[in-house]
Amino acid sequence: MLCPQCRQSLVIVECDHVELDVCFDGHGIWFDADELRQLFELAGAAGNGSGLEARFAHLPAHAGPKRRCPRCRARMRHVEAPGSSEQVILDECPRGHGLWFDDGELHEVLSSELDEGDEVLVTIKRYLGSFCEPRKEETPDG
Ligand SMILES: [Zn+2]
Ligand SMILES: [Zn+2]
């Protein structure tokens, strides 16, 4: 599968039995259908996962460049998800293959659902490592 942004191959990271595909250059992370829910299940909060997806709002078709689904290459549609500070626009395959989170978006969405320091958030962050951290400015080494 290819990164919707830079088209290089996504790298598979496995968190227990959930396989996620991430861009090596940190553009984002792909969740196959159901993997978001599985991740919450692993973290011991199955209810949060399904509750979260129920709150996604599909946006009307829009002009401009669209990203393509890494699985089927269909143009993805935008869905609006609640974020901790503002709404986050995610890309979703119209055929239901999954969801693409840009760098930093996963953190926004998770922190709107869970309190900072919540055990579930801590667990998910541990699974996902830096892919679940807030977007950071480049800092010099050291
Ligand atoms: Zn990329
Ligand atoms: Zn697809």
Image (cartoon, rainbow, N blue to C red):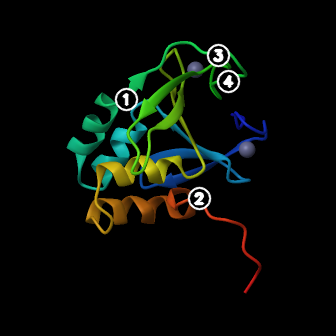
- The residue most toward the bottom is 142
Give yes or no for contact between labels 4 and 3 (Cβ–Cβ under 8 Å): yes
Callout 3 secondary element: loop
Q: Is mark 3 within 8 Å of ligand 2?
A: yes
Query: Mark 3, mark 2: which one is toward the viewer?
Result: 2
Q: Which mark, by number, is residue 140? A: none
Q: Quadrant of ligand 2?
A: top right
Q: Disc 4 designates what residue? A: 68
**Please, is residue 79 above or below residue 44 in the view?**
above
Q: Which mark, by number, is residue 74? A: 3
**Structural distance between the alpha carbons of marks 1 and 3:** 20 Å
Q: Disc 2 designates what residue? A: 135
Callout 2 secondary element: loop
**Structural distance between the alpha carbons of marks 2 and 1:** 22 Å
- Mark 3: amino acid: Ala
On the rendered structure, is 136 left or right of 34? Answer: right
- Mark 2: amino acid: Arg
Residue 102 sits in which quadrant?
top right
Number of numbered labels in the structure image: 4
Query: Mark 4, mark 2: which one is toward the viewer?
Result: 2
**Residue drawn at (35%, 43%) of the image:** 38
- Mark 4: amino acid: Arg
Q: Disc 1 designates what residue? A: 56
Query: Mark 1, mark 3: which one is toward the viewer?
Result: 1
**Residue drawn at (53%, 45%) of the image:** 20
